[in-house]
Each structure stands twice: as structure tokens, then as C-alpha cells.
Image (tube, rainbow, N blue to C red):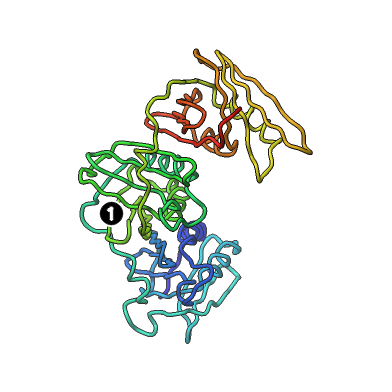
Amino acid sequence: MKFLIDRLAFRDALQKVEMGIDRKPTRPILGGVLVQAENNSLVLMATDLELGIRYRLEDVQVDQPGWAVVPGRELVDVIKDTESETVTVSLGKGDQCLVQAGDDNCALVTMESSSAGGSGPEVFSSLPVLEGKPDLIIKKNDFLVMVSSTRFATSRTQNMRFATEGVLLEVGGGKVTFVGTDGRRLACIHRDAVEGGEEKRRSVLLPKVLDQILRFGQDEDAETLAVYFLQNQVGFRLGNLESFGRVLDGEFPNYENVIPKAGRHAIRAHRESLSKKLRLASHFTQDTAAIVRISISPDKMEVSAESEGRGKAHACLEVDYVGEGFTASFNPAFLLDGLKAAHVEQIEFQMDDPTKPAKFILGENYEYVVMPLAPST
């Protein structure tokens, strides 16, 4: 194997597969990146058996086709810290992968390579080849918005009953739905498919595959993203980037039963104004008891908090509301997370009574449900 490549293009491509490198590999090869040169292109692959990434670079000068599995973190750091415009990578004697960047030379010990024969390491064959018609095509920007609108609401711990640490992807009738929940709040967003998505399917997606696409997908020169449902995996193709995530086991909560219908109280408020008042009050809450009280009266919202040893805060803002007054208590971080993800400046807050879930309408076909902490007195 020997090829010449633009260093910055190589660096960017390595960063796109870096999230697939196992940080604490149980098998050494899972800490590596497969570098495969062929037909004036370079394919990079990394997998930790939960997340798999394949990225293709075109217009690479390939002098000798071949492949090698190279220690991933070290290769990323080497290419990042060299200064030349181009890099030459080749297989040397024994188990060495040679990297020449201007006057700098490095030799990385390969885990496996084509110099020993074979078509490639078996562990990387677990990444499927995305062929044929995808099950779903969606606008890239819609997909990225849907991920950022739900990912934050997932659980950070594993639930023995529900797979709430994942994001539900549901398709059917040409519609696409993403749902994230941790049992105390829920974010749900709907968009139309560009093509496919007629057959009903549900998969709970591994969050880090969505994080990887969200982080690097915007840079890909493509208007749409293709989705493939592959038994225990879901594959995504966006431009030259292919990402694969293991489908989480376990049942996902019935989100349709969680989202309230229109509440008898409907309040409209300016997103940034409400965010500022909540942040002000949150300074007077404790981590173990983060509670703000929201009191609603005609055309007025009061946000307050009090903490022993810290003090108290009381803030007011104008809202669009006509009706009887009521008071409810919430975790301010949950409300701020939703407001940060909102797509509109004027949000709507609906509630039936202070003991039942509150529904925030944060954009077109985008709902966010938050449980109140306790009945207010």
C-alpha cells in the first residue's frame, strides 16, 4: 500500500471516523482504523461494534493498492500535528506503516495489513455495504434538526424496563418521527420523507451514531440522507459518510400516550425573555433540589426560586394569556433545554392543571413535554 494525499483532507476524514474508535478496546484491533487504498480513492473505517463508520475520500494518488489497520488515536494525532501540505503513507518492512510529511517521518506499528495477505480484517466486515434502494430518504437539514431537537431529552443512564437512553426513529406513511425521553420529559418532532418511509418501522437508535452524524453531517456535500434498516443495525449514508448504529434492545415508552392534548391553559411567551428569567431564578436553586416556581396570571408570568443559604429571586415577564391564575413548579434545567432547542421565538406553553404534564410547542410539529415537580401551594 502506498498513497499520496492532501494532509488537511486526510485529517478531516480521520476526525469523522474517530468516534468509532474504541477508547477502551477489549480487542486491540477495535482501537484501530482500517486504511484501504484502491482505485484512486481511500476508504477509512472504524468500529467499536456498537458504532461503525466508513468514509471515502476521492482523488487520492494511489501508487500501490492495499490496506492496513493502524492505531487510531496515534494516526489521528500524527496527521493533525504535521505541517506539510501532503502526506505519503506506505507499508514498510515487517509490521510498519510509514507516514512521511515533508521532513517529518513516523512509523506506526500495524495491527494487520495486506502485506500478510487476505482481503481485510474480519472485524471490519461487520460494517454492511449499503446497496440498493434505501428504506427512507429525508432532507439532510430535516434530519439534523430532528436529532438536535430530541437527543438532549434522552436518559443518561440505562433503564432496565425501557430503552430511554436511545432515540426512537419511527417511520410510516411517508412521515418520519423522532422521540427522546428520560421518563421526566419528552421531545417529539415530525417531518415528511423525501422518498420511501411508507412501511411502518420503529428502531431505538444508539445516541452516539446520531451524535456523529450531527457533528459531521453538515460538512457533507449532499442535500438528502439515506436510511437503511438492517436487522440489528440502522445504516445512514450522507455524501461520502456512512454510519452504522446498533439498535437498542428493550421497549420504548408509548410516547403518544404521554403527550397531552390541548390544555385548558395556553400561554404564549417570548423564548429568549423566558430563558433569561429562568436562568436568573436557577442561580438560587440547589443541585439536589432544582426547583423554580412559575405563576401565571392574565398577561403576566412570575418566575421565582429560593434557596436556604443563597437567597431568592423573583422575575416577571409579559405573556399572552387570558384566564384564571395558577402556579406550577419545574426543574429549570429541563425548561431551559427545551427553550434552547426551540425553532421559533414565540413559544406556546399548554397545561391542564399544575399536577399534570406541561406541553411546550417549540416549532412546527415539534412538541416538548415536561412533568411538574410537585403540586404548588
Q: Quadrant of residue 375?
A: top right
Nearest the camera: 88 or 143?
143
Seen as rendered, the residue at the extreme bottom is 94
Residue type of the residue flagged with mark 1: Tyr
Considering the image in quadrants, where does the C terminus appear?
A: top right
Looking at the picture, how far across and down is residue 365, in whole percent? 37, 31
Instruction: Say which residue appears at 66% left-offset and 27% top-offset.
Output: 304
Looking at the picture, how far across and down is residue 109, in whole percent? 52, 80
Instruction: Say which residue appears at 46% left-offset and 20% top-offset.
Output: 266
Residue 124 left/right relative to 215: left
Nearest the camera: 87 or 261?
261
Residue 101 left/right relative to 311: left
Instruction: Say which residue appears at 50% left-offset and 44% top-offset.
Output: 152
Nearest the camera: 260 or 110?
260
Nearest the camera: 319 or 272?
319
| Residue 244 visible in image | no
Residue 359 left/right relative to 175: right
